[in-house]
Structure formats: structure tokens, C-alpha cells
Image: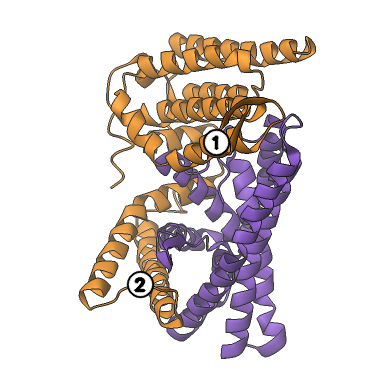
Chain colours: A orange, B purple
């Protein structure tokens, strides 16, 4: 199962106690407010808010660092290419390479926004069980078809992933090695993908029968059980105020022309 | 192929959510018009998970390996379910694996999902040309797969080229983006070939999966 995402979902922190519906609305708006930042002077405040929220979530820093490893390739590309490829003002010359001011600043902006938004999304999805967050999305009006598809796909994702691992191992034990994209190799890999699709298709028929027996499509959908407290409203108002502050500061700084 | 958080201007991210919202609404409306829409939800869900996992299969392209997008195949097999399936797949990728992003989810869903719907129509053309013959499934499978990725690359190119900040060296940025697009040309052919092979496999083993 996908338990790493839920690894810290049961901890005790104000963010864990926050009603998932309010948390979804508040933190999503905050992410978009961060996305609107273009002025470099707002970056320290943005990173400070992000650090504050992450610290308040009491999720270990090691967890964040592990998750940053996956998109590290993107950060590395931006950090390496932009400062040396883009710009008109020279900062320094390093052998044949020129370090450009505009590219370096653009790199700083993109990397800071990327890390901040990613950290907030980890706080959002790491401080409640994933299923609870999906239920909160349903309570906020997510279409029943999308909600059911998300929950079912999530339920079977790692089961199918394990099937793939088993099949790949079996192929390897029988001597299959994918070294070049020859038609034989592609044919075998296409059969592997096709087999997974066929197995999932056949399994879905059994799943549907089991769901129907349990009343799927016949009994009324249970309402998601969430109870908001005054502290949830206060939390939402606080985060919305911060988000509005960033948007207003961005507009104001742009108006100043610098 | 996934545009991460922090790169695009907020207006483009918002427009991405608007277009993906419209495409999702259209897809759900079409699904709702089906006779027994509820029965196909488990099928579409498990296939969504299976497509997501199938995209983990690495294709060797020395000196490295690539993984396929499979949005064309998804369109060919899932039809109108392809767009919600892609939206869910990208949501999982953003939340679980930090690929793509939440603020760019709408843009990425549009970039992958609209070509998937186009691929669905392309694959359906096989019935006009050659009924369900082997070559028709292969040819239109190839076209659906190649068009799915090709159109996604074009949308991504358009987005990146039109959102380069004015203070950067526009020529250098354009050259990098063109190089990135050119690097995808062999992958488009590979995606088409792989889609054709999977479509032919499904036609042989489980033809009803291609009846969408």
C-alpha cells in the first residue's frame, strides 16, 4: 500500500487537527498565491511562511528532503542551465561560461516557488490520511464519478504495481533483458503492458459484482462526516489573509515599477 | 513532459484549470449519457491504475531508458473516460511522487488529456477504413499513440515559448525549447509503435477492450 504518504498522518499538530475541508481550501489558495509571486523581495517571506507551516505540521524534515529527491532532476536542470544560458547582464566569467544576472535571479524565483509549493502540498496531504483528504474533496463537491474513480484507482494502484514487479522479475528470471529498443524487446514489453491491462479489466468485472452486492448504485451515498469547529474557521481566515497579503504585495510592488 | 510548480505564470495555471474543468465536465456529461454508466466506473478506475503503472515500464534507449506517456493508448481504450483518468493519474503523480504539481495540474491535464481524446477519435477511424482488420488496428493504434504524445509536446512547446519572461535571453530560451521538442520526435515514433503493439495485443487477447 501507499503508506509513505500516510506515514505522519496520525501525528498530533494543529495542522493534523484542522478540518481537512478547510485545510484543502486554505492551503490550495496559498499555493496559488505563491504561484503568483514574481517579485524577488517576496521570496524570504514566502520561504518563512512555508517553513513555519512545515514546522507547525511536525512532519520530520527528513521526510521533506526525501520527497524533494524525486523532482531534484528538475531543480538541477533549472539551477545549472538558467544562470548560464539566459540573461543580458554579466555577473562573472568562469572559463568559457558566462554567469548571467537575469538567469540567476529567474532560477532563484523558480526554485523558491517550486520548493514552497511542494512543501505546502506535502503539509496538505501529509497531515491527514489520503482517503480522508479525498473524502474532504467529495464533501467540497467533487463529482461522484471522479471521487469513485480516484478511490478505486488508489485502492488498486499498488496491487497492480506489485503485479508489474512480479511479472518483470519473472521475465528477468527467464532471461529477458531489455538492452536495445528492438522490435522483439518492444513486443515483449507491449505484451507486458497489455497483460496488465487485461488482468485489470477482468478484475474490474469481479470488483463491480462485489460492489453491486454491497449496494453500490442502489443505496444512497453516505454523507461525509466532517464537523467544523471555530478553530477551523480561524485557521482558514488566517491562511487566506496571508495568501491575500502575498497577492496584494505583488500587485503593489509591480505598481511601484520595481 | 510534466510542467512542475513555480514555472508558469498564475494566469496560465488558472487557464489550465478552466480548460481541464471544461474538458472534465464534457467527458462526465458524455459518460452520464451512457446506458449503464455506473457499471463502467470500476473498469475505468482499475484501467486508470493499470495505465499509471504501465507508464513505469522503462523502454531502453541507450545510454538511458525512457518511460512512455501512453495518453494516446489511454484515449484509444478508455474513450471519454480518458480525460478523468489522466486527471486522476496526474493528481496521484503530483501528490505521491512530486512529478508535475498541484498548481499546474490543470495545465498538465489539458496537455495530456485533450490529445488523449483526439487519439480516441483517431483510433475510432479504423472502423471507417478497414473494419477491425489487423493492419487497421496497428495503423490507427500507431497514429493514436503518436498523435497523443505529439500534440502534448506541441501544447507544452506553445506554453513554454509564449511564457518566457521578457527580461531573459529570449533567443537562448527558444533554442533550448526547440532542442527539447526535437528530442521528443523519436519518442513520438516510439510511443506510436508501442501503442500499436499494445492495441494489436488487446485485439488478439481481449478484443472487447477496444470496442469503446
- Per the image, label 2 sits on a secondary structure element best described as loop
The quarter holding residue B123 reads: bottom right
Q: Residue at x 44, y 27 (%)?
A: A119
Letter of the chain that mark 2 sits on in the rendering: A
Look at the picture and state if A203 lies above or below A62. below
Nearest to N terminus: mark 1 or mark 2: 1
Q: Quadrant of the C terminus of chain A?
A: top right
In front here: A203 or A81? A81
Q: Which mark is residue A178?
A: 2
> Horizontal placement of B50 versus B174: left or right?
left
- Per the image, label 1 sits on a secondary structure element best described as loop
Percent of width and height locating residue A39: 66, 18
Q: Which mark is residue A95?
A: 1
Percent of width and height locating residue B192: 58, 72
> Horizontal placement of A248 versus A45: left or right?
right
Percent of width and height locating residue A152: 41, 52
In front here: B101 or A257? A257
Percent of width and height locating residue B107: 64, 44
Q: Residue at x 24, y 68 (%)?
A: A169
In front here: B152 or B128? B152
Letter of the chain that mark 1 sits on in the rendering: A
Amino acid at each position: 500500500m501507499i503508506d509513505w504518504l500516510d506515514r505522519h498522518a496520525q501525528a498530533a499538530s494543529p495542522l493534523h487537527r484542522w478540518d481537512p475541508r478547510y485545510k484543502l481550501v486554505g492551503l490550495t489558495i496559498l499555493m496559488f498565491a505563491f504561484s503568483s509571486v514574481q517579485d524577488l523581495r517576496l521570496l524570504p517571506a514566502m520561504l518563512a511562511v512555508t517553513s513555519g507551516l512545515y514546522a507547525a505540521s511536525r512532519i520530520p524534515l527528513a521526510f521533506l528532503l526525501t520527497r524533494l529527491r524525486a523532482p531534484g532532476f528538475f531543480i538541477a536542470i533549472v539551477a545549472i542551465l538558467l544562470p548560464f544560458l539566459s540573461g543580458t547582464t554579466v555577473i562573472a566569467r568562469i572559463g568559457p561560461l558566462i554567469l548571467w544576472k537575469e538567469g540567476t535571479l529567474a532560477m532563484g524565483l523558480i526554485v523558491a516557488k517550486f520548493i514552497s509549493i511542494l512543501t505546502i502540498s506535502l503539509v496538505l496531504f501529509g497531515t491527514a490520511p489520503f482517503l480522508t483528504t479525498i473524502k474532504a474533496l467529495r464533501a467540497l463537491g467533487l463529482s461522484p464519478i471522479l471521487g469513485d474513480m480516484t478511490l478505486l484507482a488508489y485502492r488498486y494502484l499498488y496491487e497492480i504495481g506489485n503485479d508489474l514487479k512480479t511479472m518483470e522479475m519473472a521475465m528477468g528470471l527467464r532471461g529477458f533483458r531489455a538492452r536495445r529498443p528492438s522490435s522483439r524487446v518492444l513486443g515483449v514489453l507491449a505484451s507486458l503492458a497489455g497483460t496488465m491491462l487485461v488482468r485489470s479489466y477482468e478484475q474490474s468485472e469481479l470488483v463491480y459484482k462485489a460492489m453491486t452486492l454491497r449496494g453500490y448504485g442502489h443505496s444512497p451515498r453516505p454523507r461525509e462526516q466532517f464537523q467544523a469547529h471555530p478553530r477551523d474557521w480561524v485557521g482558514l481566515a488566517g491562511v487566506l489573509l496571508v495568501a491575500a497579503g502575498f497577492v496584494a504585495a505583488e500587485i503593489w510592488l509591480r505598481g511601484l515599477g520595481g | 513532459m510534466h510542467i512542475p510548480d513555480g514555472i508558469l505564470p498564475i494566469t496560465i495555471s488558472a487557464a489550465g484549470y478552466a480548460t481541464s474543468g471544461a474538458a472534465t465536465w464534457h467527458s462526465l456529461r458524455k459518460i452520464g449519457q451512457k446506458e449503464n454508466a455506473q457499471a463502467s466506473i470500476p473498469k475505468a478506475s482499475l484501467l486508470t491504475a493499470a495505465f499509471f503503472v504501465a507508464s513505469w515500464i522503462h523502454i531502453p534507449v541507450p545510454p538511458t531508458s525512457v518511460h512512455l506517456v501512453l495518453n494516446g493508448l489511454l484515449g484509444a481504450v478508455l474513450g471519454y473516460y480518458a480525460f478523468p483518468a489522466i486527471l486522476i493519474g496526474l493528481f496521484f503523480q503530483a501528490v505521491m511522487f512530486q512529478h508535475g504539481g498541484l498548481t499546474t495540474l490543470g495545465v498538465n491535464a489539458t496537455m495530456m488529456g485533450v490529445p488523449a481524446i483526439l487519439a480516441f477519435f483517431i483510433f475510432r477511424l479504423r472502423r471507417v477504413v478497414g473494419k477491425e482488420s489487423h493492419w487497421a488496428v496497428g495503423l490507427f493504434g500507431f497514429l493514436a499513440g503518436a498523435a497523443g504524445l505529439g500534440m502534448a509536446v506541441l501544447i507544452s512547446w506553445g506554453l513554454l515559448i509564449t511564457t518566457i519572461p521578457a527580461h531573459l535571453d529570449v533567443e537562448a530560451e527558444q533554442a533550448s525549447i526547440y532542442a527539447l521538442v526535437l528530442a521528443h520526435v523519436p519518442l513520438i515514433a516510439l510511443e506510436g509503435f508501442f501503442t500499436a503493439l499494445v492495441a494489436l495485443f488487446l485485439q488478439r487477447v481481449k478484443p472487447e477492450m477496444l470496442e469503446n
